[in-house]
Amino acid sequence: MQISVVIPTFNRYKILKECIFALFKQDLSQEDFEIIVVDDGSVDDTRKMVEDIAKSHVNVRYFYQRNAGQGIARNHGISKALGKIIVLIGDDIIAMPNFLTEHLRYHLKYPNESDAVLGFIDWHPHLTVTPFMRWLTNGSSIFGRFGGHQFAYEKLDGKDIADYNFFYTSNISLKSTLLKRYGFDPAFSAYGWEDIELGYRLFKQAGMRLLYNRKAIAYHDHAISEAAFKARMRDIGRSAWIIHAKYPELKKVPSRTKLLLLKLLAHPLIIWFFKQIRNMSQGRWCSFYYYALSKKCFLEGLESDIIAS
């Protein structure tokens, strides 16, 4: 078995089905890869759908666990993987037909255990991409340095190697032996930092080299709303304390000076001002508004953890 594709999922059987069927359209023989679905406590029709598919596709395997978070779900799938290479994607990722071939090609070209491969992700063509969604996938929209938090592929233009900040578990592959030895930290039960933490740990402890293959393309078929984004940023704020305790050198919890600056940026009057600019420009000048809003929600999550403790 060459490749194991590990997909954690929770209550999204419809898009998961599209994700799985896109993998059936790969130009790599189905004898060379398996699809491992880890159901993280779904209460919809996920189990029935996957088990029905598995009846006619022997390379599809289904595992269920009580809801524990995507990092733990990925660890579950990783532990069951039979492939020499493990590809990590999300349940809303739609792979192009050459997706697995491109991941495999790079691993054959770069066989060292510490060599990993990052593929490219874009919004699915059938989605209406809003100014907010465009900002979300542009990490350089403000002064060429700051921006959205989803992806920042523009920073990799012309580059072959990425650092740990690009450890995107929506489209990444690693040698099975490496991933099984390290795995995701189960302390990260909520959304946020579990991927970056593993990426940093692999760089630091295993000397991982993250190779960027722009041809390993997959589409993100999930329109993200501002409300969902706010909740995500609060989760990231809460989880920042966990990664800060492990790696204070990363400074994921802001210093006093930076905290003061972020609070000024996230002040209601500043956010109101940026929002008016966004509205008057019909969304063209939205970067400062969304960035300030993201920091406001991040600080809410960060400070809620202090209050809770």
Image (cartoon, rainbow, N blue to C red):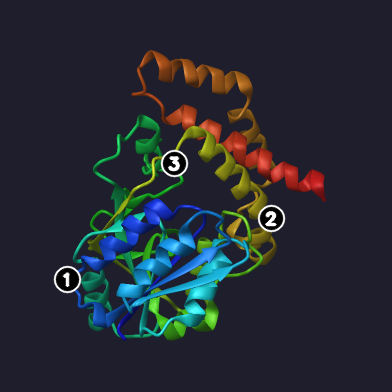
The residue at the point 28 percent across, 62 percent down is 21
Q: Position of residue 32 (x, y in %)?
A: 26, 82
Q: CA distance from mark 2 to mark 1?
A: 43 Å
Q: Is residue 249 above or below residue 229?
A: below
Q: CA distance from mark 3 to mark 2?
A: 22 Å
- SS at badge 1: loop
Location of mark 3 (residue): 146
Q: Is residue 197 left or right of residue 164?
A: right
Q: Position of residue 143 (x, y in %)?
A: 39, 36
Q: Is residue 279 above or below residue 258?
A: above
Q: In the rendered picture of this protein, how many numbered marks are placed on residues?
A: 3
- Tell me where residue 284 sits by quadrant: top left
Q: Is residue 137 above or below residue 11?
A: above
- Tell me where residue 295 sits by quadrant: top right
- Identify which residue, 301 or 170, lies in the foreground: 170
- Identify which residue, 2 or 297, lies in the foreground: 2
From this viewpoint, is residue 234 visible?
yes
- SS at badge 3: loop
- Tell me where residue 13 sits by quadrant: bottom left
Location of mark 1 (residue): 27
Sooner in the amino-acid sequence: mark 1 or mark 3: 1
The residue at the point 40 percent across, 59 percent down is 170
Q: Is residue 177 left or right of residue 216?
A: right
Q: Amino acid at mark 1?
A: Asp
Q: Amino acid at mark 2?
A: Trp
- Identify which residue, 307 or 156, lies in the foreground: 307
Q: Position of residue 239 (x, y in %)?
A: 64, 54
Location of mark 2 (residue): 241
Q: CA distance from mark 1 to mark 3?
A: 38 Å
The residue at the point 24 percent across, 43 percent down is 125
Q: Amino acid at mark 3?
A: Phe
